Amino acid sequence: MHLHRYERIWLMIGGGTLVLFLSIVGVQAFAMDAHPPGSLVTVNPQTVTQEAPFNKPSLTQVGPKEYKAVMVGRMFTFQPGRMEIPVGSTVHFQITSPDVVHGFEIAGTNVNMMVVPGHINRATYTFDRPGEYLIVCNEYCGTGHQVMSGKIIVK
Ligand code: CUA
């Protein structure tokens, strides 16, 4: 098969970048132990919402301007769905799912994680600006995916 010279160069550039990027992902995953946030903690998705702390999803104050949010993401809602905190508060989120994979993104922040059945994922964020923060599910999870949202009110 005859390949034009430029075509061969293009294929080499394409193949080279593929190898380069896969190597970077490989080094991060296996040598630097990069993984999704908190995914080392496992739970039984069938019973997780009957056991503490996920049987009572809630926002609790754990210190001055410091809160813990124990959350469940399920078809098609976040529990608790509405949280109010004073401005400057730091919230430690932990979330799991009893059904399918959901997303947990707080719009306008860098909090963006997956909600995976069988895992507890965690994120911490300090809300320095007042306002209404929208929590969106950004993983397609079924027929009600587009209505799955929550709210954090910071004032
Ligand atoms: Cu939950 Cu999309």
Image: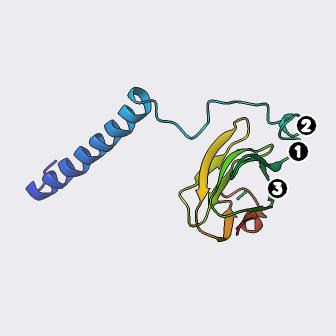
- Circles 2 and 1, Cβ within 8 Å, touching? The answer is no
- Circles 1 and 3, Cβ within 8 Å, touching? The answer is no
Q: Tell me the amino acid under the disc marked 1.
A: Lys
Q: Residue 80 — which label?
A: 3
Rendering colour mode = rainbow
Q: How far apart, in angstroms, are the residues tagged by discs 2 and 3?
A: 16 Å
Q: Residue 56 — which label?
A: 1
Q: How far apart, in angstroms, are the residues tagged by discs 1 and 3?
A: 9 Å
- Residue 129 placement, left or right of 10: right
- Given this view, does label 2 or label 3 mark the residue nearer the observer? 3
* Residue at figure coordinates x 68%, y 67% from the top left: 134
Instruction: Farthest residue to the front: give it.
Output: 64
Q: Secondary structure at mark 1?
A: loop
Q: How far apart, in angstroms, are the residues tagged by discs 2 and 1?
A: 9 Å
- Residue 26 placement, left or right of 34: left
Number of numbered callouts drawn: 3
From the viewer's perspective, is residue 48 above or below residue 31?
below
Q: Residue 50 — which label?
A: 2
Q: Tell me the amino acid under the disc marked 2.
A: Gln
* Residue at figure coordinates x 86%, y 40% from the top left: 49
Q: Secondary structure at mark 2?
A: helix
What is the crowding at mark 1: few (fewer than 14 residues within 10 Å), some, or many (at least 20)? some
Spot occupied by residue 54 in the image (x, y as percentages of width and height):
83, 41
